[in-house]
Amino acid sequence: MFKKTWKQIRIFIILIIILVCLPHSILPQRTDETGKDDLENYKKLNESEHGLIEFKDTDESLELKLAQLDVINKSRRKYKALPVKLDILASRVANKMCREAADNNYIGHWNMAGEEPYLRYAFAGGYDHVSENAYGEWSSDNYYFSLIGSLMKTGHGKFMAERAPYDGHKQNIIDKSHNFVGIGFYLSGKQFRYYEEFIDRYFEFENIPAEVKVGDSCTITVKTNGQSFLYYIIIYRENWPHPLTPVQISKKGSYRDYTNQEYKDIFAWDLSRYRNGTIYEIPLRFSEEGLYYIQIFSDKKEITKPASLNTKGKSPESGIVIKVNR
C-alpha cells in the first residue's frame, strides 16, 4: 500500500517539475480577451453616451463588438502595437455609416451627404483624429444576425491579408499611434457592412465651437497629459460638401486626410505662448466661410524659438472641424 502511494506521489512531483520547466510558449498564454468586468464597464459607457443615440448598440451587439475587439488587438499584437479600446461614439458613427451603405447598396468612405470620415466623426461630437477602414459584401440569400461575428472576422481578415504597396487597411490596423477604435456593422437583407474607425486620442478639448461667423474670434482649449507639448497645428479649409450618389461613392476609392487648401499653420514657438501649465488657450479667426479641419501634432520637447519643424513620422492627434458661416 505504501509503495503504491509513494509511486503516485513521485509521478505527481515529476509532472510538477515538467510543467515548471516547460517553455512558456507551450503553456496556455494570458490573452487580451474582454472579461466580464470590461463588458459591464462598456455597458455603462454605452448608457452614458448621448451622441447619435439612434445608433446605440444593444447589449448583444456590444458583446459581438468586444469579441471583434479581441480579434483586432490580436492583429495589432503580432506587429508589436499596443491594444486599442472600444470607443462608443466612434462605434455609433460607424453604425450609422454601415446602415446607410447597406441600405443604399454601396461601399465607400463618403456618405451620401458627401462627408468624409473626419467630417462625420466631428459632426457627431468627436474631436480626435480618426482613420477609417470599410468593408462590405452581399449574398444571393438573406443574412442572419447569428453570422455577424463570422462576417466581421472575415472583413478584418481581408484587411490583414493585404500586401504592400496596396495595404492601406492593414497599415491602419497596426498603426501604433491608435489607442481606440469604433466598430460598426449592419445587415440589410442581402447586404452586410463592417467599418473600423481607429482613433488617436491624446488630448482633452474644451470650448470647441461647432460653428462661428466669418471674422469672429474664438478660442480652442487643449489639455495635454503633461508629457508632451504642442508642436504644430495645420488648418485646412474646404467647401461645404455636396451630395453624392451610391455609384459616385463606390467609384471614389480611398480618401485623403487633408484638403487642397491649407489655410493656416501655427508653429511650436507660437503655441508655447498660449500654454499655461498643461493647458493651451489658442485664439482663432477665420476669414472665409467653409469647413475648417484642424490637425494638432505634439512632441516630448517644447520649442520656444523658431526652428526647423518636421511632421514626418508624427500622427495628427486631433480631428477638430469648425463650420464658418457669414
Image: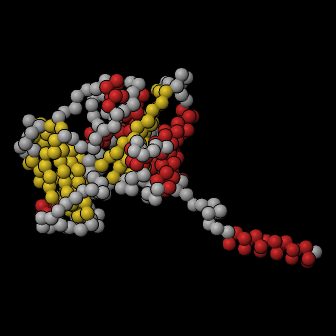
Picture quarter with the C terminus: top left
Q: In the displayed structure, does residue 152 sit left or right of residue 112?
A: right
Residue 243: quarter of image? top left
Picture quarter with the N terminus: bottom right
Q: Is 250 located above or below residue 216 in the figure?
A: above
Q: Is 19 located above or below residue 65 in the figure?
A: below
The x, y position of residue 177, in whole percent, is 36, 55
The x, y position of residue 17, in whole percent, is 72, 74
The x, y position of residue 9, in whole percent, is 82, 74
Image point (20%, 57%), residue name: 232
In the image as oriented, which residue stretches furthest toward the front?
Answer: 165
Residue 60, can we see it?
no
Residue 259, can we see it?
yes
Image point (33%, 52%), residue name: 200
In the image as oriented, which residue stretches furthest toward the left?
Answer: 215
Q: Is 86 located above or below residue 93 in the figure?
A: below
Image point (48%, 30%), residue name: 137
- How many marks the image carries: the answer is 0
